[in-house]
């Protein structure tokens, strides 16, 4: 009996340590590879500008935009999709993905509603506001970070984890939006 309890305790401790490793790796990646550029003025300005445009949007408008995005993504030219993918902030995000040599799979910015502002590649939906990546960051407040579980991502076609964080106005510290960075799961092991 004593041996069984010791064995069970060891197995539990080992599995807990293994589960903590991806979070530790993601925190290290966040600190060293993301935080140095997260307050780039171009990104902050893009979110601030979209917040001014979407400030009065209600749930029906947001849902209509999300449905429009889902219908148009991958279907050719679209003002909504192109507006998110073809701007200077999106180009900056693509450069960060390229510089990561495959570690980062995607990056996208969200406004105060959880609507896409800029993305390195198309996302499966336009509104992220109903997902943990937004609810556990922007809705929590400044300095909030959320690490997802590792799962298969349809938009990037890879097994990845996501690091999401609240983005703030550098002058006031007030939350203005959020950012999600997809990380290739193999790079976390």
Image (spheres, grey):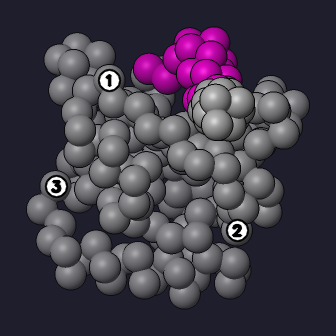
| Residue 28 belongs to magenta span | yes
Mark 1 or mark 3, which is nearer to you?
1
Mark 2 or mark 3, which is nearer to you?
2
Of the numbered discs 1 and 2, the one sitting upstream in the chain is: 1
Residues at discs 1 and 3 in contact (Cβ within 8 Å): no
Q: Nearer the viewer, residue 75 or 129?
A: 129
Residue at point 66%, 50% (across, down): 150
Residue at point 41%, 32% (across, down): 145
Q: For the residues marked 2 and 3, what is the alpha-carbon distance in whole angstroms?
A: 30 Å
Q: Which residue is mark 1?
A: 143
Res 147 seen here? yes
Left or right: residue 15 versus residue 58 is right
Where residue 166 appears, as percent x and y from the top left, is 35, 34
Task: Look at the image and give the residue range highlighted in magenta.
Answer: 17-39
Residue 154 bears which disc, if any? 2
Seen in the picture, residue 30 relative to 182 is either above or below; the reply is above
Where residue 68 appears, as percent x and y from the top left, is 45, 83
Residue at point 77%, 43% (across, down): 185
Where residue 189 appears, as percent x and y from the top left, is 81, 32
Q: Which residue is mark 3?
A: 55
Left or right: residue 36 versus residue 161 is left
């Amino acid at each position: 009996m004593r041996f069984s309890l010791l064995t069970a305790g060891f197995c539990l401790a080992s599995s807990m340590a293994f589960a903590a490793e991806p979070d530790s790796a993601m925190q290290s990646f966040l600190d060293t590879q993301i935080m140095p550029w997260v307050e780039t003025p171009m990104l902050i300005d893009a979110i601030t500008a979209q917040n001014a445009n979407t400030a009065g949007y209600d749930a029906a408008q947001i849902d209509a935009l999300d449905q429009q995005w889902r219908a148009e993504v991958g279907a050719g030219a679209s003002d909504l999709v192109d507006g998110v993918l073809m701007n200077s902030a999106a180009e900056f995000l693509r450069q960060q993905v390229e510089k990561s040599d495959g570690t980062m799979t995607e990056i996208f910015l969200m406004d105060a509603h959880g609507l896409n502002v800029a993305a390195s590649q198309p996302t499966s939906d336009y509104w992220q506001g109903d997902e943990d990546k937004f609810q556990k960051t922007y809705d929590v407040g400044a300095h909030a970070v959320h690490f997802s579980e590792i799962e298969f991502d349809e938009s990037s076609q890879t097994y990845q984890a996501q690091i999401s964080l609240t983005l703030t106005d550098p002058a006031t510290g007030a939350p203005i939006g959020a950012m999600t960075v997809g990380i290739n799961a193999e790079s976390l092991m």
